[in-house]
Image (cartoon, helix red, strand yellow):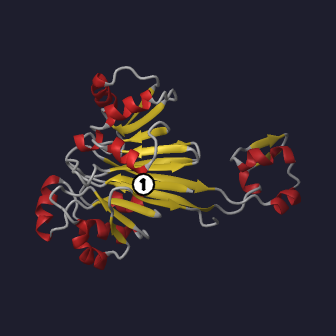
């Protein structure tokens, strides 16, 4: 099961009824946060989740509304007596930006490991899942992210017994190991069935529509996209500032063939995103004008 919570849905500045955009996911004991704007700590508290077990923080880019909440978040994690290392992933310059922000959070009881991306696409294989970063089109270097959980096929006992594979190798083969015993080589496909459907969530804000979003969102169970403007007359402004309208996000969802789209990163001037959803849904019926704290538990098909 993958827990997903869109902690905040605002862009540019936090409002009394809308925190800045950030997304948190929890899977198999790991917690992943994408973006950390001002107010993210409060949104996390409102959700009832703790910042202490956050293992990874990914940054789309370094505009203040996506990273200004980091110093306070780090201090809170430190005050909670966290000692485990924290992995941070972001565009080139991450170490410099985090170092500058840590002027007001200099002493922490845990190590921070920064990994910088300078490719158009980068995949990070972690324990039980992958994070895929892909370049998008904003007025600064910016990335979208997908969290991908792949599932191997089921263990095929009858097949294993028929092949006479020693039981001492079963567990290792299920975990993907290749084992050589003399002239005989045992491979995972000898004990496993066809790969099963996993889970995938794709998150992207602050960009113009690009083919990279469409391609990287394919196969996603949930797509979270910027819908900064709903007013039809704001298209030119979206183009100038390298943002997206709700309608453009809906068209991407159609092209990517996803089942559900959550809109986020609303302009402060967009007081009631739901007012525009009738026309958005004409483009993509699975679109939702997300509000702060919107959550879902994604489950594997067999569950």
Q: Seen in the image, is 86 located left or right of residue 117?
A: right
Name the one closer to the observer, 241 or 189. 241
**Above/below status of 243 relative to 99:** below
Visible in this render: residue 187? Answer: yes
Question: Considering the numbered disc 1 on the image, is that residue within a helix, a strand or a loop?
Answer: strand
- Tell which residue pokes out farthest to the bottom in this image: 282
Q: Quadrant of the C terminus?
A: bottom right
User: Residue at image x 11%, y 62%?
Assistant: 236
Q: Horizontal and vertical percent for residue 112? A: 43, 28
Q: Seen in the image, is 36 located left or right of residue 298?
A: left
User: Residue at image x 50%, y 53%?
Assistant: 148
**Above/below status of 296 relative to 29:** below
Question: Residue 153: which quarter of the image?
Answer: bottom right
Name the one closer to the observer, 141 or 12. 12
Question: Residue 192: which quarter of the image?
Answer: bottom right
User: Residue at image x 47%, y 36%?
Assistant: 52
Q: Horizontal and vertical percent for residue 58? A: 39, 42
Q: Horizontal and vertical percent for residue 54? A: 47, 39
Visible in this render: residue 121? Answer: no
**Above/below status of 67 relative to 251:** above
All told, the count of numbered labels is 1
Q: Quadrant of the N terminus?
A: bottom right
The residue under label 1 is 5
Question: Residue 126: which quarter of the image?
Answer: top right
For disc 1, the neighbor class at 10 Å (few under 14, some 14 to 19, many from 20) is: many
Name the one closer to the observer, 223 or 278. 278
Q: Horizontal and vertical percent for residue 238? A: 16, 59
Q: Seen in the image, is 222 located left or right of residue 206?
A: right
User: Residue at image x 29%, y 65%?
Assistant: 249
């Amino acid at each position: 099961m993958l827990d997903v919570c869109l902690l905040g849905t605002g862009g540019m500045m936090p409002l009394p009824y809308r925190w800045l955009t950030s997304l948190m996911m929890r899977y198999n004991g790991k917690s992943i946060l994408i973006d950390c704007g001002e107010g993210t700590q409060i949104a996390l508290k409102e959700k009832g989740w703790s910042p202490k077990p956050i293992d990874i923080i990914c940054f789309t880019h370094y505009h203040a509304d996506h990273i200004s909440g980091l110093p306070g978040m780090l201090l809170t994690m430190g005050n909670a007596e966290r000692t485990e290392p924290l992995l941070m992933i972001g565009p080139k310059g991450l170490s410099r930006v985090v170092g500058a922000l840590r002027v007001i959070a200099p002493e922490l009881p845990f190590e921070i490991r920064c990994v910088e991306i300078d490719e158009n696409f980068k995949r990070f294989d972690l324990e039980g899942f992958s994070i895929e970063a892909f370049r998008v089109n904003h007025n600064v270097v910016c990335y979208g992210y997908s969290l991908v959980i792949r599932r191997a096929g089921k263990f095929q006992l009858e097949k294993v017994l028929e092949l006479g594979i020693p039981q001492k190798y079963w567990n290792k083969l299920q975990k993907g190991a290749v084992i050589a015993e003399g002239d005989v080589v045992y491979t995972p496909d000898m004990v496993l069935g066809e790969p099963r459907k996993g889970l995938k969530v794709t998150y992207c804000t602050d960009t113009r529509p690009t083919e990279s979003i469409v391609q990287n969102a394919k196969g996603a169970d949930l797509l979270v996209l910027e819908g900064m403007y709903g007013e039809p007359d704001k298209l030119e402004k979206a183009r100038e500032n390298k943002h997206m309208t709700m309608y453009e996000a809906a068209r991407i969802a159609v092209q990517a063939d996803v089942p559900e789209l959550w809109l986020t990163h609303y302009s402060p001037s967009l007081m009631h995103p739901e007012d525009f959803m009738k026309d958005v849904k004409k483009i993509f019926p699975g679109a939702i004008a997300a509000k702060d704290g919107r959550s879902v538990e994604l489950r594997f098909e067999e569950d």
